């Protein structure tokens, strides 16, 4: 199952907020980044988890994937 599907099932409000943020950002915001920003805004206790996810993402080459952007 894709990560985005799991997120929609487990945290639909955060997923909706991330999609909304992604659409309003004029510079092309990746979904992963939008998700992390939303979670940081409303769930400050998740900072260590998001920090680890960002670190792993950067170690794997970083950058946005094509699937992270709205068409």
Image (cartoon, rainbow, N blue to C red):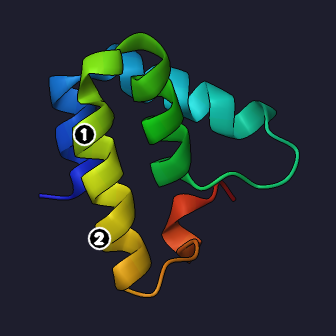
Q: How dense is the environment of label 1, judged by Cα within 10 Å: few (below 14), some, or many (20 and up)?
A: few
Residue 62 vertical position relative to residue 17 in the rendered view, above or below: below
The residue that appears at 53% across and 49% down in the rendered structure is 33
Among all residues in the image, which is located at the extreme right? 26
Q: Which class describes the residues within 10 Å of circle 2: few (<14), some (14-19), or many (20+)?
A: few
Residue drawn at x 17%, y 42% is 6
Task: Find the residue positioned furthest to the bottom.
Answer: 61
Q: Nearer the viewer, mark 2 or mark 1?
A: 1
Q: Where does label 2 land, which residue?
A: 56
Q: Which corner quadrant of the image does residue 45 belong to?
A: top left
Q: Is residue 38 left or right of residue 9?
A: right
Left or right of 4: which side holds 29?
right
Place of residue 11 in the rendered image (x, y in percent of width and height, measured from the top left): 24, 22
Residue at the image point whose x is 29% and y is 70% from the top: 56
Task: Please name the residue shown 45% across and 87% down the image.
Answer: 61
In the rendered image, residue 2, in percent from the top left (x then y), is placed at: 21, 58
For residue 63, which numbered disc appears in the image?
none
Is 38 on the left or on the right of 50, as rendered?
right
Q: CA distance from mark 2 to mark 1?
A: 12 Å
Q: Which residue is mark 1?
A: 48
Q: Is residue 14 left or right of residue 69?
A: left
Q: Earlier in the sequence, mark 2 or mark 1?
A: 1
Q: Quadrant of residue 24?
A: top right
Helix, strand, or loop for circle 1?
Answer: helix
In the rendered image, the vertical position of residue 26 relative to residue 55, given as above or below: above
- Residue 22, placed above or below residue 53: above
The picture places residue 71, in percent across and down from the top left corner, at 69, 59
Which element type, helix, strand or loop, lies under badge 2?
helix
């Amino acid at each position: 199952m894709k990560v985005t599907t799991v997120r929609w099932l487990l945290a639909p409000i955060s997923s909706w907020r991330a999609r909304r943020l992604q659409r309003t950002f004029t510079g092309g915001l990746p979904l992963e980044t939008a998700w992390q920003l939303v979670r940081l805004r409303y769930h400050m206790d998740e900072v260590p988890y998001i920090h680890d996810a960002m670190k792993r993402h950067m170690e794997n080459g970083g950058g946005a994937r094509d699937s992270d952007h709205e068409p």
